[in-house]
Image (cartoon, coloured by chain):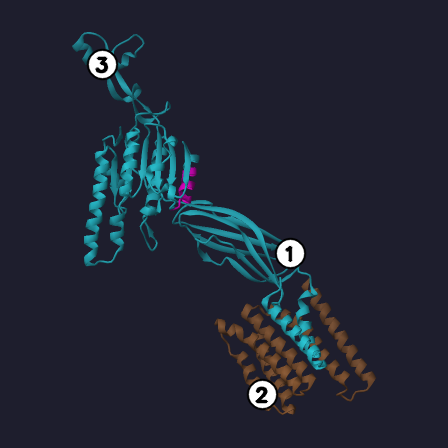
Chain colours: A cyan, B brown
Amino acid sequence: MMTKAWFLLVSLSLMLIYLGLVCRNSSLLALAFPYLLFSLGPFWRKMLRPNLKVQREFENVFLPDGQTCRIKISLTNGGEALDEIKVVDLVPRRAQLEGICEYFGPLRPGQTISLDYTIHGLRGKYEFSGLFVSVGDLWGLRRREDFYPAPGTLTFFPQTENLQKIMISPRRTRIFTGLIKSRESGTGVEFWGTRAYVPGDSLRHLNWKAVGRWDFLITNLFEQERIADVGIILDARRIGEVRRGKESLFEHAVRAAASLAKYFLEEGNRVGLLVYGNYIAWTYPAVGKQHYARIMAALAEAELGDHAVFKEFQNIPTRLFPPGSPLVIISPLHYKDIFPLRYLRALDYQILIISPNPVAFEESLLPHDQFRHTAARIANGERNMIISRLRRSGLKVVDWNVQQPLRLALRTLGEKGRCLSG
Amino acid sequence: MLIWVKRLLAIFSGTLLLIMFFPAGSTWIGIAGLILNLVMIIPGKRSFFQFIPHFILLLNTGLLIYGIFCGGNLLWALLAAVVTLFAWNTSLFLSRWPAAPHEVQRLYLRRTGVALMSGFGLGFSTIFAQGKLSLAFWPTLFLMLAAGAFLLKLLREARIEGK
């Protein structure tokens, strides 16, 4: 590829030639020669695609936001000497860099250069495609641009918070033993009730006091503990977002979702995640550490969206969640959400809404003036109305001021009460 | 190192313009050309300064055409053109790579030397062809062959360095 400087040179030489021919002036023709000679200079050498070997190394590919990741790129010249080479690593736009991700200079045969830089972790998935390499001659008249793939993915997943006990008691549980009370008698530790002894019952579970009172054998029953399918719905609609500079309410919601997913998975439950915003990003329920990583990756990719289909909660795909299962919805809440959430409750889902308070969040970021307090009171009034209507419909709502840890907000549910019971 | 080469070339190209215009009777144009060429000496990092070399190249080419129409000497015009081209290209190099290592600067000078010599060779060949110098045939042929051999040597060196 020829540069603009070359085109200028060629234009001048052609102009001189045409002027010399038109005016029939041999001196002008002679004057065109240095220009022509100079413009033909770059063609002295063939400009082949440089034989470069590129290798990208990450210090870590999956790490929590707020941390830093060191990236090292090694570039080895396996071909002929390159007088002037410019190498730029095509870093994702959102990435915050420290260090230099480009090189400009000569590259001898066999020489290796390395680009070493650090990325500051902001939640997200960063896809690295490769390097942009531009090789030119020293005269700056010819240039060859190539792309060298050096793919890599770096994921900064949201930070999590250790939550205290959240008791859930769904109508339906799975058959596998877990920590969720299943509302059925069987093997367990919590007392469930009594019934008449039948041969085969363990004698250890005989209720001797009841036997003394009723004069026939009565045995204790215990509540079975099983695992449940917990659905976490993260509201990623742009309508609920409050952003001031780097502070974003959605980021708090994502962290809450991550903390809850971690908590429920540690309790042995199957956890599914639905990010509801631009499209339906569904992570199928499963258990285990691998699934935790899957959910964290999904949350790392979660982005706000304003798709018309997902403007309201009406289009939540209920088929994804087993009937009667507990749903945890993380949403700032909008007055239009009341009806769809009531509808979900009517479908027999046990719903816990964790609502990051947008009013308190925005108020803390606004400058102090006479109108702020009044505006906050009005907005809080509307919000309280939404929350009280939802609570009256049997939904559990946690009004979470994001300046406080989530575990403090969850305390309002009561420490021993079954906060997610039907 | 290269910055001084650029400055010298700028002064040199302006002086050559003055020399070309002096016998033609348009000395004031030559002086204006010299002053404008000296603008290239001003150091600057703003985008405005990036355009100065291009502007000077266009200006000098225009002045050379005018000088030839005014009856200026072709030899001086050719020399001025060659020097202008190198001043322009050195400025481009420095704007692209302000802190180039000395090795690269030397390599650049060597590469440009090839074209510079060919430009000078062309200029002298023209003057010989015009018969402006009272040289006999054999010394002229010898000088041209020597210049050609030197040129080829430089070209070969540049090519080997490239590999």
How far apart are labels 2 and 1 at the CA level?
Answer: 47 Å
Q: Is residue A80 left or right of residue B28?
A: right
How far apart are labels 2 and 3 at the CA level?
Answer: 120 Å
Q: Is residue B17 left or right of residue A217?
A: right
How far apart are labels 1 and 3 at the CA level?
Answer: 86 Å
- Vertical position of residue A40 compared to residue A306: above or below: below
At which x and y percent is residue A101?
Answer: 50, 57
At which x and y percent is residue A69?
Answer: 45, 50
Q: Is residue A289 magenta?
A: no
Residue labelled with disc 2: B29
Res. A14 visible in picture: yes
Identify the mark nearer the N-term, 1 or 3. Answer: 1
At which x and y percent is residue A355?
Answer: 28, 42
Q: Is residue A301 magenta?
A: yes
The image quarter in which residue A141 lies: bottom right
Write down the region rendered in magenta: A293-304
Q: Residues within 10 Å of mark 1 (few under 14, many from 20)?
A: few
Q: Is residue A196 left or right of residue A57?
A: left
Which numbered disc, 1 or 3, marks the residue closer to the eye?
Answer: 1
Q: Amino acid at mark 2?
A: Ile
Q: Is residue A269 left or right of residue B31?
A: left
Residue labelled with disc 1: A49
Q: Secondary structure at mark 3?
A: loop
At which x and y percent is residue A74?
Answer: 56, 53
Q: Which mark is residue A207?
A: 3
Residue most extreme to the left = A213
